[in-house]
Image (cartoon, rainbow, N blue to C red):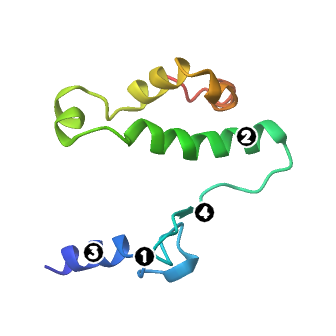
Amino acid sequence: MARTRQHQTLLQGHLLGRSSAINTQPEDTFELRVFASSLDIRHVQAALAFADASVAYTRDLTIPDTTTRGVWTWGAFTQWLRTRPQYAPLTAELEDLACAC
């Protein structure tokens, strides 16, 4: 019960309030605070692309997709990225960091 309550609190954005890595307050806000600051244009573009791609990739997924089609893996995500040129800065950054599968 306590774990469920903590999870619900986290989802509501109240666990750490506006200082958490994912800020959902006020209601119409979804703010990610997980990237280090940078003046490197490609690095900033890659960070923004990652945020956008994460939403775009998961937008139409269903629970069965994640359990039966194998789409909930890093490899599936990076393969999907490679087919979308708008995410080229992210793909290049991942390759430089040897993160792409």
Residue position for label 3: 8
Q: Position of residue 68 (x, y in %)?
A: 16, 29
Q: Nearer the viewer, mark 2 or mark 4?
A: 2
From mark 2 to mark 1, how far is it between C-alphas? Answer: 26 Å
Circle 2 SS class: helix
Q: Which amino acid does label 2 sit on?
A: Gln
Q: Residues within 10 Å of mark 2 (few under 14, many from 20)?
A: some
Residue annotated with mark 1? 13
Classify mark 4: helix, strand or loop: loop
User: What is the distance, in whole Å, between disc 2 and disc 4 at their CAs?
Assistant: 15 Å
Q: Is 9 drawn above or below residue 35 in the view shown? A: below
Quadrant, the N terminus: bottom left
Identify residue for label 4: 33
Query: Mark 2 near mark 4, Cβ–Cβ under 8 Å?
Result: no
Q: Image height check: is 24 above or below 74?
A: below
| SS label for mark 3 | helix
**Sequence-first tag of 4 and 3:** 3
- The total number of labels drawn is 4
Disc with the residue nearer the chain's start (2 vs 1): 1
Residue named by callout 2: 45
* Element on which disc 1 rests: loop
Disc 2 to disc 3, C-alpha distance? 32 Å
